[in-house]
Amino acid sequence: MGVGLSEILKGKQSIALGGHIRPDGDCVGSSMGLYLYLTEQYPQIETDIYLEEIPEAYRLIQKTEEARNCIPEGKQYDLFICLDCGDEKRLGFSAPLFQNAKQTFCIDHHVSNDAFADINYIVPDASSTSELVFGLLDKEKIGKPEAEALYMGIAHDTGVFQYSCTSPETMEAAAELLRKGIDGNDIIEKTFYEKTYIQNQILGRALLESILILDKRCIVSAVSKKEMDFYGAKPSDLEGIVSQMKLTQGTETALFMYELETQNYKVSLRSKGKVDVSIIAQYFGGGGHTRAAGFTMKGSFHDVINNVSIQIARQLDQEEIQV
Ligand code: 5GP
Ligand code: MN
């Protein structure tokens, strides 16, 4: 990127940070990491952070209680920084602050991001937005609290340094963060692997009810609103289900959906590499990465399967023709 963080911050008196709806580990990690750094290094700038409710496990990151989940009326910031957010719509409640800001800056790694801010730092090959934030900071000035946040974000979006997006640079960033004296294992254990009883129950239910389609190359499962209410599960309790489904031997893709409200599904897609799921997600109005993407769709569970499986089959057939 041609512009450094200090240049972007020059002359700014107020900054708002925002992430995507239903924030995940990388969204919380990158935005809290930058928030903790800015409030420490630039105390003269008024910096506020806007995020939807942060899932309980991520609250081990310091100052998450300072994140606001509603916006002040008529407020105009000199700069709005959006993180891990592929499009303006996904900012959710903080979108009016983005629209109202004097300048906007987007830091993201989604291949589907169409550079919707004034200044855009988008690197689709990067493992995570947290890795990109790390790259923007003065390494000597990174403190332990922001190192914890960024490490969490990188660990989450790489599936604990395992997905193909994990590069030598990712490992170098993680190493540099570990040198700040953080307990990396504890962060991974508590925010990535540990599940509540409810989370494990609903994971078990989704796996039990899953089906194999497209000649066993796609695994599908769904959780209805009624089931979520029965278990007392929130959307964030369903994180990780689709990744577990993807581990099924012989499958190429995993399709998991849950009902946000009656007949309106949040759909998650995962691929082992043969199918580019970001193309499918974009086709249905969403976005993401080549191996992990999502969107929302109105209709029944069967409508979603019918529509999405056609797109998956098309790519799988194409792949076979090329072989
Ligand atoms: P997940 O399936 O875990 O919700 O999301 C997988 C990836 O796709 C994440 O990087 C997420 O940001 C992105 N994603 C999920 N749903 C949507 C959506 O509705 N719109 C866009 N633009 N991206 C999405
Ligand atoms: Mn991310």
Image: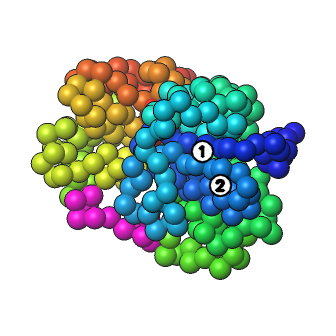
Q: Is residue 123 above or below residue 314?
A: below
Secondary element at image label 1: strand
Q: Can residue 35 be seen at all in this image of the molecule?
A: yes
Q: Quadrant of the C terminus?
A: top right
Q: Can residue 130 be seen at all in this image of the molecule?
A: no
Residue at image coords 49%, 57%: 66
Q: Does the residue at mark 1 contact the one at mark 2 (Cβ under 8 Å)?
A: yes
**In the rendered image, which quarter is residue 41 located in?**
bottom right
Q: Position of residue 211 (x, y in %)?
A: 25, 40
- Which residue is label 1 attached to? 17
Q: Position of residue 234 (x, y in %)?
A: 27, 48
Main SS type for the magenta part? helix
Callout 1 environment at 10 Å: few (<14), some (14 to 19), or many (20+)?
many
Query: The magenta stretch spans which residues?
Result: 188-200
Is 192 in front, or is 304? Answer: 192
- For marks 1 and 2, give the CA distance: 8 Å
Tell me, yes or no, whether the highlighted magenta stretch contains residue 98.
no
Q: Amino acid at mark 2?
A: Leu
- Which residue is label 2 attached to? 34
Give the tally of numbered discs: 2
Secondary element at image label 2: helix
Residue at image coords 71%, 31%: 103
Is 125 in front, or is 136? Answer: 136
